[in-house]
Amino acid sequence: MKKLVVAICLLTFSFTLAFAQNAKPDSYCGYRGMSDWLIEYQKNPEAYPQRKTGAITYLPMTVHILGDDDGNGYFGQKQVVDALCTLNEDLLPYDIQYYLAGEFNYIDNTEWFIHDFRGGRDMMNANNVDETTNSYFVEDPAGNCGYYTFGPDALAVAKNCAGPEDHTWSHEVGHYLSLPHPFVGWEGTDVDATQPAPTRVGGNNVERVDGSNCRTSGDRFCDTGPDYISNRWSCNQNGVSQEMIDPSGTAFRADGSFIMSYSNDACANRFSDEQAAAMHANINDERPDLIKNPTPPAAIDLAGGGTPISPQNDETIPFGTVEFQWEPIPNATHYLVEISFLSPNNDNIVMSRGLVDEAKYVVDDFDARFVGRPLNWRVRPFNDFEFCAGSTDFYKFSMSNASNVSTISEVEEVSVSPVPAQSGNQLIVGLIANETFEMQASLINLTGQVLRTQNYNMISGSQQVLFDLPIVAEGVYMLSLQNDKGERIVKRVVIN
Ligand SMILES: [Zn+2]
């Protein structure tokens, strides 16, 4: 993501939004059957490119975020970063990692936001970015939590099935990289757990417990074991399913740890070795266009930055526009800024989030209801490759009733830089005046003590004047600008 993605600021109380999460769809996944490529591959896996353990394969991802026609309902930026983190955590043991190939692609289209398979194909055909994996986050992907579809070769995931603990995205990426369900053949058929299973179901041989037919039945992988359950199921404390009976009369329980199974997200956490080998062979053989060998940046160093510059921790600032500024975090290219007005540790009550590509975030529409409340803010760094770097601590600030909106009739615009300024150096006061006037500038500490005063003859038009900072302790000060009529503008100055 090369440029600023979008800064969205939700300053309304968002309790209803946060708690009005819809239930997950009944159907977990809309994928069926086996890929032709996999059937060929499984005849002779040795003939295909082999996984090189220890060398990570980086794959480009395009994230499409759908909203309705009016731009409502986007999958949140924090949620996308969380989901990318989970996806890469799921894939890392298999030496596969995704990186963002471009900025998030926002699409406003109600018929794609809530779509049937035909609408989904139209959406994918119209928006897929070549030579990347295309993932579409929508409200309803044809009644499923997600699906991968061969034609447009893209996958769709329901927002409600893409939480940080969910593995739907990883499951659909598994399909994208050729993996079937371990219960392939049983899709849409309920198993009768009291009877031995039939020898064939859904046009597919039924896998036996003893492994005697594992190459010709089920998913044709021998290390995933038999699984006949095509509805979402909960594993027991041993991570396995209810008891079932194979065609030869042997009782067994399906392994719930496989991401490609329909076990609940709490059970699923892995791919098998044979599945991982097939994914790598698929990338190299069927999807070589995805291999671009990018060089990932060095790891994000959360401890190497992130400390607040403005507001400072525990600072009380005048109500009005707040410019959040923090020490840049090494190797971060983007930041999610979270501002919360209650207990900071509950995600649901973070009221404002913004995504910026520099260590600065401006909120110019704080509600007056927040005056006098303790407020918390933190930043979460990421870049195109790293989504799990975590967040800074929460910092505290509050806003006082004293307005920082003030005027001098001759002044149209004024700015003070640098931020932060250095003790003993100079401040630059940039100013646009509509006529000449005499200006007095004073540096004042937070207890109201005047530390230095300088006088200037300002001209009409744009100009810069310098203010000599005294040697003072690090902290927050006020620069008061005043004309001879007593009108005043006060600017905050942070001095290091
Ligand atoms: Zn599936």
Image (cartoon, rainbow, N blue to C red):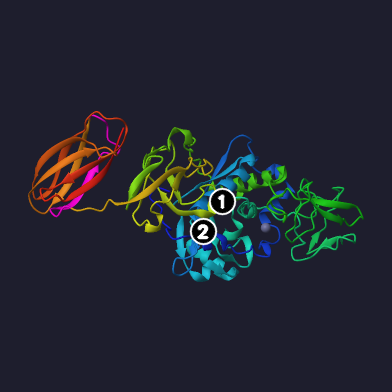
Near mark 1 (Cα within 10 A), the count class, few <14, some 14-19 or many ≥20, is: many
The magenta segment:
408-424
Can I make out residue 128 in this image?
no
The answer to whether 22 is drawn above or below residue 393 in the figure is below
The answer to whether 370 is drawn above or below residue 85 in the figure is below
Foreground residue among 57 and 326:
326
Label 2 beta carbon within 8 A of ligand 1: no
Please say if the residues under marks 1 and 2 sit with CB atoms less than 8 Å apart.
yes
Foreground residue among 296 and 356:
356
Describe the element under mark 1 as helix, strand or loop.
Answer: helix
Near mark 2 (Cα within 10 A), the count class, few <14, some 14-19 or many ≥20, is: many
Foreground residue among 409 and 183:
409
Residue 75's disc number: 2
The residue positioned farthest toward the right in the image shown: 249
Q: Residue at x 19, y 42 (%)?
A: 429
As measured in the structure, the alpha-carbon distance from the residue carrying label 1 to the one carrying label 2 is 10 Å
On the image, the x and y values in percent for residue 271 come to: 69, 46
For the C terminus, which image quadrant? Answer: top left
Q: Quadrant of residue 91?
A: top right
Q: Residue at x 82, y 58 (%)?
A: 205
In the image, residue 215 lies in the stretch drawn in magenta = no
On the image, the x and y values in percent for residue 178 come to: 65, 53
Compared across the picture, whether 313 is left or right of 198 comes to: left
In the picture of the structure, the residue carrying the numbered disc 1 is 83
Q: Amino acid at mark 1?
A: Ala
On the image, the x and y values in percent for residue 290 come to: 53, 48
